[in-house]
Amino acid sequence: TSWDGPDAHRPLLHRGQAQAKSIAGGIAAYKPAKIYTSTATRCIQTVMPLATLTGMALKESSKLSQEKWSPSGELVERFVGRRFEDQTAVVMCSHGPVIPQIVAEIVSHTRADVDDVIRRAASPATGDFSVFHVAFLKSGPHLVSVEYHDAP
């Protein structure tokens, strides 16, 4: 199918909707405290099954959208920094050029060594997702492990 409207309003395809429903339970098992999403329709539709399952409200943020993306990554830096200040498990749904910046900020905050899983998480295929396990220690945040999940 083709989409003629603004990219930010492009909906998920049927396959994407099915994938979003199938991963909601697995993501809910991590007990996220908040669900953040880009303002793009397809991102909102991606996390809607998770929000429905958990009864949580979605928090839309243009800082996660490609429309507000900038090479400097300043908005993403502040957004991810705030999540580290909160020290809670969160879901972030984003896309395109924003995801590598999110991953870079997680690496920066945790002073983690970049490995193949982190590199893959920074450039996921459509529908794939990653889970970053961060421990908040007295010495600061520590990246314990990263899980990469292929789209169902």
Image (spheres, grey):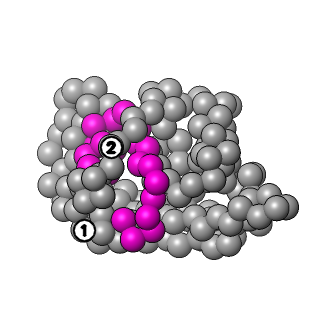
Image quadrant occupied by the C terminus? bottom left
What residue is rendered at 75% in x and 52% in y? 108
Residue 20 vs residue 56, the one in the foreground: 56
Q: Residue beneath label 2, please?
A: 57
Q: Is residue 62 visible?
A: yes
What residue is rendered at 85% in x and 61% in y? 139
Image quadrant occupied by the N terminus? top left
Horizontally, residue 141 falls left or right of residue 6, namely: right
Question: In the displayed structure, would residue 133 be above or below residue 61?
Answer: below
Q: Could you say which quadrant of the image residue 5 lies in?
A: top left
Find out whether residue 37 is within the magenta segment.
yes
State the extent of the magenta-drawn residues as a range.
28-48
Horizontally, residue 149 falls left or right of residue 119, namely: left
What residue is rendered at 17% in x and 40% in y? 2
Residue 57, given in percent of the width and then of the height, sits at: 33, 43
Horizontally, residue 25 falls left or right of residue 110, namely: left
Residue 37, given in percent of the width and then of the height, sits at: 40, 42
SS at mark 2 in the image = loop
Q: Residue beneath label 1, please?
A: 22
Amino acid found under the numbered disc labelled 2: Ala
